Image (tube, coloured by chain):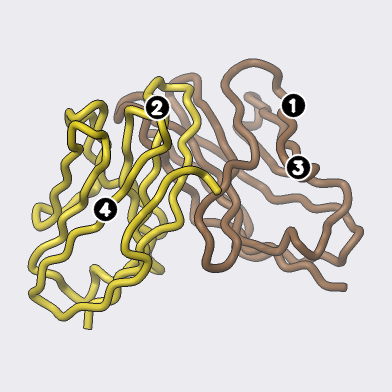
Chain colours: A yellow, B brown
């Protein structure tokens, strides 16, 4: 158990809908990262937050957004969902420094029908 | 830009034989390199990491990797495979330009037969 929790574990929704994925980092970790794992794109970095502020952006679509709250949990919002958004979404956390290990949660599996 | 290439998409070994999973990296900077493992329907677990200290890095479950700058390689090895090693393995590099985000290889599926 990495100490990173993600909810829900599974999510099934329809095209055009909006969903929110939630992540709680390990105790004491200030950085939260979101990654998407799909069959065609592999594992891709989406976005990073550090202590409530956006730190870095990767291949995140404009339909997606995220935030980190004062208690350091993070939410990833996916809107106007398309079939191609079906994937496993991972959250990871770290203490924040460049050499710090990222610990991954179990992921949320999203299926868009 | 930094990248990693995992040279084999699938590796099959027999239990008790050595494991070699190959990874080459491309980096303009002094990279940090990692190997993560993903068991079926599980999250990602860090096996080991290289951060410019010793070039031979020992990880969990008997795995180790050697950083070879001249060959831009970071191959993962284990002397003797166990059935429980069957999983997906990812070679990963950190991207200092994008902060501390990780860049993943495509993955290598390791199968272990009895």
Tell me the residue that label 1 is attached to. Answer: B56
Which residue is denoted by mark 4 in the rendering? A22
Residue density around tag 4, few if under 14, some if 14–19, many if 20 or more, within 10 Å: many
Q: Give the residue at x 43% y 24%.
A: B28
Disc sitting over residue B24 in the figure:
none
Label 3 element class: loop
Question: Does A89 sit above or below residue A87?
Answer: above
Quarter occupied by residue B75: top right
A79 above or below B101?
A: below
**Gap between marks 1 and 2, in whole Å?**
30 Å
Residue occupying the far bottom of the picture: A113
Residue under the image location 16 percent in, 65 percent down: A19
| Chain letter of disc 1 in the image | B
Q: Are labels 1 and 2 on one chain?
A: no
Which residue appears farthest toward the top when viewing the image? Answer: B53
Q: Regarding mark 2 in the picture, which secondary structure is present there?
A: loop
- Look at 88% across and 52% down and name the residue there: B80
Task: Name the residue tied to disc 3.
Answer: B63
């Amino acid at each position: 158990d990495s100490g990173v929790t993600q909810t829900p574990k599974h999510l099934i929704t329809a095209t055009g809908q909006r969903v929110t994925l939630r992540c709680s980092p390990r105790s004491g970790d200030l950085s939260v990262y979101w990654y998407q794992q799909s069959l065609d794109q592999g594992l891709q970095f989406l976005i990073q937050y550090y202590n409530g502020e956006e730190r870095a952006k990767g291949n995140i679509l404009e339909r997606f957004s995220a935030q980190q709250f004062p208690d350091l949990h993070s939410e990833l919002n996916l809107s106007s969902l398309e079939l191609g958004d079906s994937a496993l979404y991972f959250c990871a956390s770290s203490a924040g420094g460049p050499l710090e290990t990222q610990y991954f949660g179990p992921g949320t599996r999203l299926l868009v029908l | 830009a930094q990248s990693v290439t995992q040279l084999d998409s699938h590796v099959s070994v027999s239990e008790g034989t050595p494991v070699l999973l190959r990874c080459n990296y491309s980096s303009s900077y002094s990279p940090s390199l990692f190997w993560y493992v993903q068991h079926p329907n599980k999250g990602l677990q860090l096996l080991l990491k290289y951060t410019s200290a010793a070039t031979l890095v020992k990880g969990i479950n008997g795995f180790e990797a050697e950083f070879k700058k001249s060959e831009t390689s970071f191959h993962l090895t284990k002397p003797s495979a166990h059935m429980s090693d069957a999983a997906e393995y990812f070679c990963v590099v950190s991207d200092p330009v994008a902060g501390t985000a990780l860049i993943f290889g495509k993955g290598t599926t390791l199968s272990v037969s009895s």
